[in-house]
Image (spheres, coloured by chain):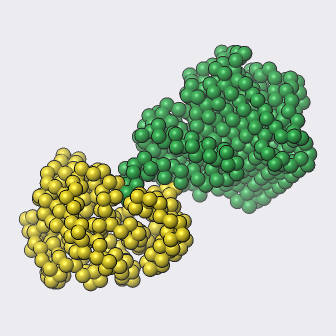
Chain colours: A yellow, B green
Amino acid sequence: MATLEIRDLHVSVDTENGTKEILKGVDLTVKQGETHAIMGPNGSGKSTLAYSLAGHPKYTITSGTVTLDGEDVLEMSVDERARAGVFLAMQYPVEVPGVSVSNFLRTSATAIRGEAPKLRTWVKEVKSAMEQLQMDPAFAERNVNEGFSGGEKKRHEILQLELLKPKIAILDETDSGLDVDALRQVSEGINRVRENGEVGTLLVTHYTRILRYIKPDYVHVFSAGRIVESGGAELADKLESEGYASYTKGGASE
Amino acid sequence: MAEAQNIPVGSTTAGSIAVAAESTVATRMSAPPSFDVGDFPVPHGREEEWRFTPLERLRGLHDGTAVATGDGVKVVVEAPEGVLVETVGRDDARLGRAGTPADRVAAQAYSSFDKASVVTVPKDTVLTEPIRIAVHGEGGVAYGHQVVELGAFAEAVVVIDHTGDALLAANVDYLLGDGAKLTVVSVQDWDDKAVHVAQHNALIGRDATFKSFVVTFGGDLVRLHPRVAYAGTGGEAELFGLYFTDKGQHQEHRLLVDHNTPHCKSNAVYKGALQGDDAHAVWIGDVLIQAAAEGTDTYEMNRNLVLTDGARVDSVPNLEIETGEIAGAGHASATGRFDDEQLFYLMSRGIPASEARRLVVRGFFAELVQQIGLPDVEERLLAKIETELEASV
């Protein structure tokens, strides 16, 4: 069973005013089939955790370990992590000029699966995944993220999640900027992937809204670069009514 | 209509649409067009038409000090049956009819060549195989003149392939009879040290169609000046260009479409990728719609993809309109960069860095490459792009 283990993770970034530590000792274990919600105020470091796990070059790991089934994730390059089964749905995915969605998806699936998917089944697979996410087929011929609306970008991220079938899915603020209908469709996409029981999900969010559609097994409150409280789904209800005020006093990283 | 976005540091993307009684395209030049090199002052680098070009790297083409040597270039013309291939002297009446040298180096070439090559596709002849003109540099200095003439309703594809090493200045004339269809693919696949400066003149007959692909990979300095004018109404020009500018290379493409005749069309799309320190691409797109050219429909676009730091692009579209009675006119220029965030995004989907770069560059050029319609040329270009990319990583 796939297990992601994060132990005492410290991460810093270079800023104009020198090096700044953002993550200050994160411990977390995510197992296949589980869904963990990471919640916290802006600037608490939850997106840094997401990008550090994917290997974004902006972040420097200063200490701690991350392993996936015992393999050292931190030693892997960004593409190796993806091929090992780590997927990050980004909050602000970038435009890639000159590369069509269909070409991108196929290249990516080929890299992740280790061989080019058979054309006929692949076309069907993409088509049905796009239909379920209410995406126009013409979308496949557009350049990756070029001129996409906020909702289209998120659908495109979840489309990749469905097609790439990772072991660990990290969803960074996938709910932000979505209207209710889009949030529901995107959440249904995430649930389809979760329901097959083969993915461990790390749902990073500021709001509790998405948790109405995606029921987490665990909720962790993130503040000042650490997990300060962990609990079950009921912890989200507490955050819904009380907000983050009790966690941020004197502890915010900003 | 003008757009400019994501401009990397050290690049300029300027554009203008001028509505003028007198042509600024003409007055920006140091001297009016002439066949006589003596009519052009030796450029110093501040002139509008020379300001982007490193003159010292022209190795004397611009100041009369580059003297032709016997071992300049070897030209081999391979033509299907029905095509007339001739080598002619300087006094042949067909030379210089498509256009007049517009700058000092073109005039130098016209004043200095010894023999010219004339390829003629007679009236009503429709070729099914391309004409191939191989221009191979043998290491010396050369001045050249090439004419390709299509009679009325003739159809032909011409591939001009430049390889080897040379210091070459040349004029190439394309004469299209009424209703003729000419596709030209000019490939600049020079060795690293070659210097190539050329003016291409197309004179498009009534209802004739001229399609040109200018593909520049090699050379130390390549400066091409494709020019189009119309001899009758209903002419169409499609000008496509593709360049891959590497470390230290200077590749300059300066287009002029002179809409001097009513109801003609032009469409220019040039795309370039750059990588490495001091890779410098220049694109000038001058489109002039003269007062008489009512019903003109024109569009020009330049796109650049900067793959690494240290490269520079200058992209200057100019559209000059002397009549309001046109069907359409537009231009666009944009220079974007393949940056770390794009690389991260593709890699985070399992795609290795080298393949990510290849994916982006192939995608960027694909729409142009696919239009060439010659499988061997298309494959060679794609292979060339791969080689260029591998050299970068």
Apparent side of residue B260 relative to residue A131 in the rendered image (left or right): right
Residue A34 visible, this angle: yes
The image position of residue B237, as x and y in percent, is 75, 50
Q: Kindly give the residue lying farthest to the right in the view shown.
A: B123
The image position of residue B301, as x and y in percent, is 61, 51
The image position of residue B46, as x and y in percent, is 57, 29
- The residue located at (78%, 58%) in the rendering is B295
Image quadrant in which the C terminus of chain B is located: top left
Residue B51 visible, this angle: no
Residue B134 image-quadrant placement: top right
The image position of residue B210, as x and y in percent, is 77, 48
Residue B59 image-quadrant placement: top right
Measured along the vertical axis of the image, is residue B269 above or below residue A154?
Answer: above
Apparent side of residue A225 relative to residue B226 in the rendered image (left or right): left
Image quadrant in which the N terminus of chain B is located: bottom right
Question: Residue B15 versus residue B187: which sits nearer the camera?
Answer: B187
Apparent side of residue B29 relative to residue A77 in the rendered image (left or right): right
Question: Residue A14 versus residue A217: which sits nearer the camera?
Answer: A217
Measured along the vertical axis of the image, is residue B137 above or below residue B7?
Answer: above
- The residue located at (16%, 55%) in the rendering is A65
- The residue located at (19%, 78%) in the rendering is A217
- The residue located at (22%, 56%) in the rendering is A71
Measured along the vertical axis of the image, is residue B200 above or below residue B206?
Answer: above
Question: Residue B350 versus residue A211: which sits nearer the camera?
Answer: B350
Q: Kindly give the residue lying farthest to the left in the view shown.
A: A250
What number of labels is visible? 0
